[in-house]
Image (spheres, grey):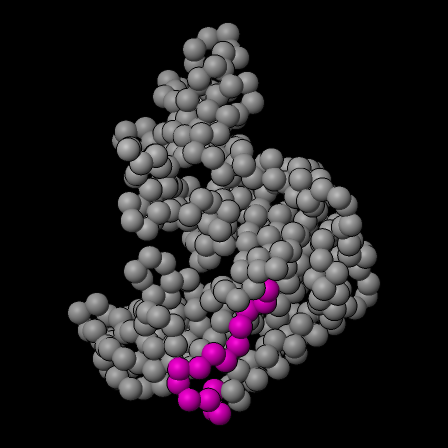
Amino acid sequence: MKQMIVHCTQHVTRMALLENGRLVEYAAERDQQQGLVGSYYKGRVMNVLPGMQAAFVDIGQKKNAFLYVDDVLHPHLDKQPEVKPSIDTLLQPGQEIIVQVRKEPRGGKGARVTTHYTLPGRWMVYMPFAEYVGVSKKISRESERNRLKVIGERLRRREEGLIMRTVSEDEQADAVEGDLSFLRAQWEMILRRAEEASAPALLHSDLSIVQRFIRDAYNPQLDELMIDSAKAVREAEAFLTEMAPEGYKPVGFYRGQEPIFTAYGVQEQLLRSFSRKIILEGGATLIWDETEALTVIDVNTAQYTGGATLEETVTRTNLLAAEEIGRLIRLRDTGGIIIVDFIDMELEEHRRQVVERLGRVVSSDRTKTHILGWTHLGLLEMTRKKARHDSASFAPVICQCCGGTGKVGAWLE
């Protein structure tokens, strides 16, 4: 069973997702700083750089957004030219354009934007100009994949594209059609606002953090949702009424004396899971170091001695580590390049087992992770897309003066 635990303060909403009592996802959002990903803007092209095959677009943020040529071409690969045209034949400075944020601004970089528009609903993702129907790869039954594709092809208009989400498996066609009608109305509203607004202008914001998790990870009939704010309870119930008109499990209002994250064991798991050093069952450890684009995870046996031979001990340690790494990548929302330094194993079969164990765990992650395999140095190489960085709000704030390299001490007299 899944539990969504939501802690609301005056300025911050924090959300934890538990599966059988174990923390698997966490995110936080400031009330006045809702994430940009998924939002639509009417922007103005400021610079077009053929040498970079990119343009910079003013969307009203501190930094201009970055628009790469691939995000200007047709979203259907079969409709793209064999040779990419120069970006300056597609866009001109001063041109006004509707863009959608696909990646948050970070560090000195502005947001990454696209014209490959998507609107996620409960059962599908709507793409106004994609011209194809896709089905989630997590739906394995071929008969169900074919059924959903037939429904999608019947419902979509000529230029539209649809991706049937995992939760649409075995869903009635009427519910899917209702979702499509709602998303079409949203898109038409965005177009109307774009006609009336002057660039730069916000046209449409993505859902709040709680609404996103309800839409993407919550089963209204089976899962538990517990919130410690009466206002947030009312908002969640209103959203659930719209999303699941056939009925849903009542939203819980937490009134306990101790903080909700403490009562449900979330705070303790957060402190342990976001540490640099993570201790595994039996005493093995992970050392977790992150940069802006690269994460390095080192696996150590430490105090673990649970095998009859060295190879058995090492393999067991690596299997435990693979299980935990898969969970923590999702929980910490780690993105970019990920390198794991597992303990050296002699047998190829044991290396295969470690990769399979890690693959099973990351398969439940809604963000796609690619396990690329072992390098010549015996390191496991992975990549994971990261659009948001909500979870970073849990981590300690880095000092702007020293970048976290200094130490706090007393003045000497």
Q: Up-down: is 292 above or below 304?
A: below
Q: Residue at x 50, y 25 (%)?
A: 279
Q: Nearer the viewer, residue 265 or 204?
A: 265
Taking the image as shown, residue 308 lies to the left or right of residue 294, namely: right
Residue 112 highlighted magenta (yes or no)? no
In the picture as drawn, the residue positioned furthest to the left comes out as: 51
Q: Which residues are magenta?
A: 194-209
Quarter-wise, where is residue 150 in the image?
bottom right
Q: Residue 366, percent across and down?
A: 55, 52
Q: Residue at x 75, y 44 (%)?
A: 257
Q: Nearer the viewer, residue 407 or 24?
A: 407
Q: Residue 4, percent across and down?
A: 68, 50
Q: Up-down: is 310 above or below 320?
A: above
The reply to whether residue 226 is visible in this rendering is: yes
Q: Residue 357, percent across and down?
A: 52, 32
In the picture as drawn, the residue positioned furthest to the front comes out as: 413
Q: Residue at x 32, y 51 (%)?
A: 400
Q: Nearer the viewer, residue 102 or 128?
A: 102
User: In which quadrant will I find the N terminus?
Assistant: top right
Quarter-wise, where is residue 352 in the image?
top left
Q: Residue 261, percent across and down?
A: 66, 43
In the picture as drawn, the residue positioned furthest to the top comes out as: 308
The reply to whether residue 361 is visible in this rendering is: no
Q: Residue at x 48, y 29 (%)?
A: 278
